[in-house]
Image (cartoon, rainbow, N blue to C red):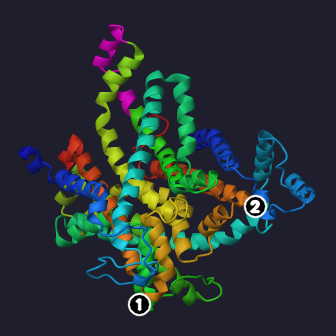
Amino acid sequence: MSWYLRRHPRVFIGGGLVAFLILVAVFAPWIARYDPTLVNVSQSLEPPGPDHWFGTDDLGRDVFARTVYGSRISLSVGLIAVGIGFFTGVSIGLFAGYVGGLVDLLAMRAIDALLAFPALILAISITAAFQKPELWHAMVAIGVVAVPLYTRLTRGQVLSVRERDFVLAARTIGAPPSRIVLRHIFPNITNPLVVQATLSIAFAILAEATLSFLGFGAQPPTPTWGADINYSQRWLSNLKWWMSVGPGLGIFLAVFAFNFFGDALRDALDPRLRRSGT
Amino acid sequence: MTQYIARRLLLMLPVALLVTIVVFVLLRLSPGDPLVIYAGEERDPVALAALRVEYGLDRSMPEQYVSWITHALQGDLGRSLRTRQPVLESIVERLPATLELGIAALLLSVTIAMVVGTLSAVRRNSPLDLLATGFTLAGVSLPNFFLGLLLILVLSLAIRIFPPGGYTALREDVWENVRHLILPAITLATASMAVNMRQVRSSLLETFGQDYMRTARAKGLRETTVVVRHALKNALIPVVTIVGLQVGAIIEGAIITEQIFSWPGIGKLAVDSINGRDYPVVQAVVLVSALSFMASTLIVDVLYAWLDPRISYSGQRS
């Protein structure tokens, strides 16, 4: 453990930041002193101070409480959206890569079509296909956007592993394809998938914030970072800066933590990067 | 090379067809009758039926798709439900503003990334390198809508150097155009600048370890010549890929920035149309952005082959 810590300190720093975010989300009711949706007009637009660390918005809601509770939405969207993308993409990639032939060709053309869309435009189009914007629509949209990435990554890894000796040996003793894929191939391709999943959570958090900012995510009064920044715009000309700084820092910290952790994991798990030192 | 381009174009056709199907189906899946949204529930049913026939909404989905794609291939992307303006006309009207913003942001991003990325690699582990590395991590993590608001807050509202939003056409007033352009361009450029800076630095560091660099130094060339003529030229190949893809994603990047700065481009048109459920416009914008993204991927691949003689797409070494 101490050897690993000395050799890969960035993994521990990144992991620490991610763990901190998770703790904030889990213990939000104990960390925030106010209800994030509690309206108290008598305390509206108060600047940061001892009572309200990040100030209050025009409805007197505590910005710190909304920022802390916002982490719950962001992290759950990040995890669920990446879960959707991971499960779907890896399943298609495993199937297409192992079976090959026409199945592979058709699956890859469909994935190419999804890849042809810029990510944000595809996510917005998917959320627009639903009549009313809701949080789970954003989760599905971000998950779908992530599918091609996992499919291509998994397929490429399967192609390189499926001709290896241990797979041939399993095939020779008559192991069924599902067992070969799940017990022999999948465990050997997890490293790049784990790295990609960590980096994708950063993307998903940013994408959710963007969709919420544009009004396609969770709806008021749910505390979400993107929507709160959008809401703060109307008070910007009065220089009520604190309404946007709390949620902005929340997004920044969350995206930074997962990006940093993902990068560190990639360096630690990829021996080629370890050697080049870049 | 010509054969390769022709093959890629042929392969792009089925993908482009799939893209049009995805665009069409996605928006038609949306519940609710767009005409009722615009005409209102109390609208005369006869008039509503006439409008439905005019927009082809009375036909089956496959028929609607065939009609839409046939017209689209002839340059007719339909009419806006909100303004009744031809969609192509409204896109062409807004394209210059989006292109201006996108090109300005790319120039800013590439220029600064090249200079700082190179200095950062040459002076590895120096304070400048650490600062640049910090910027690259922060740059990709900072949401551009938050950065845009911070810039407006500080440089438009507190110090009042730049206008907080709006647009003046280049032909009307060059100075005003530039003043309005600076903040949106910085907002749009920051994330890509961080990515490009990181790519320039890591590509250069990789190139520094190559044998031809040692040879160049052994010949007694000046360090500047070694870096610019030998290292940078080779290190730029992966940078070209990323920048090429950024060109293709101009519309995507502009969506948020145009919204914050009330910049009258395609990105703002897209968001306004989605909020207003103006499907013909949304379909057209999504289609144009996907096709331009595909075209830029092809151009990047061709440029790649042209820049790096070791890459041969016929399967043989050239």
Asked which secondary structure carries label 2, the reply is helix
Image: magenta residue range: A157-175
Q: Position of residue A198 (x, y in %)?
A: 32, 48
Q: Is B191 a magenta residue? A: no
- Earlier in the chain: of badge 2 and badge 1, it is 2
Q: Is residue B43 left or right of residue B281?
A: right
Picture quadrant of residue B77: bottom right
Q: Which residue is located at x 67 percent, y 43 percent? A: B21
Q: Main secondary structure of the magenta part?
A: helix
Query: Quadrant location of the C terminus of chain B?
Result: top left
The residue under label 1 is: B158
> Callout 2: few (<14), some (14-19), or many (20+) C-alpha neighbours within 10 Å?
some
Q: Residue drawn 24% across and 63% down?
A: B121
Residue at image position (45%, 65%) is A226
- Distance from the alpha carbon under mark 2 to that under mark 1: 41 Å
Task: Classify B63 as above or below A21.
Answer: above
Q: Nearer the viewer, mark 2 or mark 1?
A: 2
Which residue is labeled 2 in the image?
Answer: B37
Which chain does tag 1 point to? Answer: B
Q: Residue A130 location, x and y as percent?
A: 62, 51
Farthest residue toward the top? A173
User: Chain for mark 2?
Assistant: B
Kindly identify the amino acid type of the residue bearing the numbered disc 1.
Ala
